[in-house]
Image (cartoon, rainbow, N blue to C red):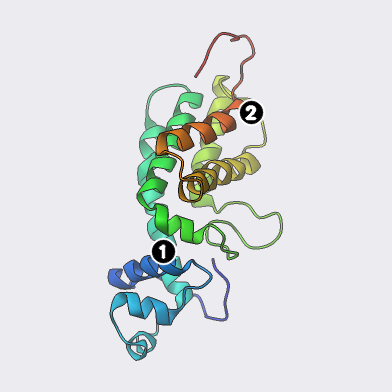
Amino acid sequence: MFQSQDQPANSEHIEPRLVDATAAAITRWGLTETTRERIAVEAGISRATMYRSGVTRDQLVAALTARAAQTFRTAIWPALTGRGSAAERLRAALEAMCAAAEQHLPLLAGMFSAEGEVFHRPGPNALTVDVFAEPFERLLLDGAADGTLRRIPETVTATVLFNMVGWGYIHLRSSHHWEPEIACRSVIDLALHGLLNMEGRPSEAL
């Protein structure tokens, strides 16, 4: 998660209103400029009250990330378990991710340029954290098995998919102000172009 000198702790018992305030602060200031003081302002409490709570900035960001992970899982679950080829389900999962991003666009735009490890592991050559990457890994493996997707390194490709489609959509929406449908279709079509296995199916389109 986002690195600081604060010690990590379990975020399960953090008050929901503080998590909401963290989201509001990130939306207003961006992740890198969000402090406990600014979170306190959004929560309508004093800085002293915030500090007495013992909750650190990193714990609040961790709780917000956990909430985002649950939203992500809920959004793409139908695509993972539904009918259709792996290629069809992958498109559905990517569309669901864009739809979920649209619901939280100002917040995610505030996280876009952050240097901390919120959605990916720390260090060089980092991969997306498992909760966000694993569903795409699963679909890529399914696609290699049913022949609708090319056989490629699924772990690295899952990270590329999450970032290329997810952050690409967020940037086109928040900075370029593209329409949601156009932004979603553009990033997904480009991503799938390199993944679809078209051998023996020259006239088939997903």
Q: Residues within 10 Å of mark 2 (few under 14, many from 20)?
A: few
Q: In the rendering, which numbered label is found on residue 101? A: none
Seen in the image, is 60 located left or right of residue 168?
left
Q: On the image, which quarter does residue 48 sit in?
A: bottom left
Q: Is residue 194 above or below residue 63?
A: above
- Between disc 2 and disc 1, the foreground one is 1
Position of residue 162 measured from the top left corner of the image (x, y, whole percent): 54, 44
The residue sitting at the right extreme is 124
| Viewer-proximal residue among 181 and 94 | 181
Check disc 1 and report its element: helix, strand or loop: helix
Seen in the image, is 195 located left or right of residue 36?
right
Position of residue 127 measured from the top left corner of the image (x, y, whole percent): 62, 52
Q: Is residue 46 above or below residue 42?
A: below
Q: Is residue 9 visible?
A: no
Q: On the image, which quarter does residue 67 sit in?
A: bottom left
Q: Is residue 44 above or below residue 89?
A: below
Position of residue 32 measured from the top left corner of the image (x, y, whole percent): 53, 70
Seen in the image, is 143 located left or right of residue 107?
right
Seen in the image, is 186 located left or right of residue 69?
right
Question: Which residue is disc 1 drawn over?
Answer: 27
Check disc 2 and report its element: helix, strand or loop: loop
| Viewer-proximal residue among 92 and 73 | 92
Q: Residues within 10 Å of mark 1 (few under 14, many from 20)?
A: some
Q: Is residue 201 visible?
A: yes
Q: Quadrant of the N terminus?
A: bottom right
Q: Is residue 92 above or below residue 11?
A: above
Q: Amino acid at mark 2?
A: Gly
Using the numbered discs, state the Cα–Cα distance from disc 2 to disc 1 in whole angstroms: 34 Å
Q: In the rendering, which numbered label is found on residue 194? A: 2
